Amino acid sequence: MTTSTVLYIGNLRTEAKHTRSGNSILTDAPIDNHGRGEAFSPSDLLATSLLSCMMTVMGILADRKGWMLEGMQGNVIKQMGDEPRRVAGIEIEVKIPLRNLTDKDQEMLIHTAKTCPVALSLHPDIRQDIRIIFVP
């Protein structure tokens, strides 16, 4: 089954439609690459998908273990490189409510996040700076 279809709307904008759900995502070229920067750029989505994947697999682990991760939040900083233009680095900070997690539980969550499918699929030249902070 097709995962998604993408339509080039024009003016450096696309609309990606998820086949199963029908949900759509717009992309726009960034301002520093001839675009308007009015939506996620494709490389923004690449960087953001890393954080989303990390949170998803941590959520799967938490569901299995009976842990509560609601309120977990994260931020992404994408760093571009030149010649060739590419994503050179992704910085992620995740804050997880502590809620009775032991040191071992925290280590399991960190390992799970850092070995999510997107993290393992990114080219090794893309620097991944991952900080996971447990907050009271």
Image (tube, grey):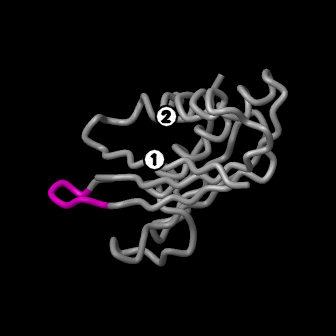
Q: Amino acid at mark 1?
A: Ile
- At which x and y percent is residue 82? 19, 61
- At which x and y percent is residue 98? 73, 46
Residue placed at 73% from the left, 55% from the top? 136
**Magenta stretch containing residue 82, yes or no?**
yes
Q: Amino acid at mark 2?
A: Lys
* 128 to the left or right of 50: left
Task: Please say if the residues under marks 1 and 2 sit with CB atoms less than 8 Å apart.
Answer: yes
Residue placed at 52% from the left, 43% from the top? 50
Residue placed at 47% from the left, 51% from the top? 47
- At which x and y percent is residue 126? 31, 44
| Nearer to us in this view, 117 or 94 | 94
**Magenta stretch containing residue 53, yes or no?**
no
Region rendered in magenta: 80-85
SS for dot 2: helix
Q: Is residue 30 above or below residue 97?
A: below
Numbered mark located on residue 130 in the image: 1
* 15 to the left or right of 67: left
Characterize the magenta stretch by its predominant secondary structure.
Answer: loop
Label 1 – label 2 distance at C-alpha = 8 Å
Q: Is residue 12 above or below residue 73?
A: below
Numbered mark located on residue 90 in the image: none
Quadrant that contains the N terminus: top right
Q: Is residue 76 above or below residue 118?
A: below
Numbered mark located on residue 114 in the image: 2
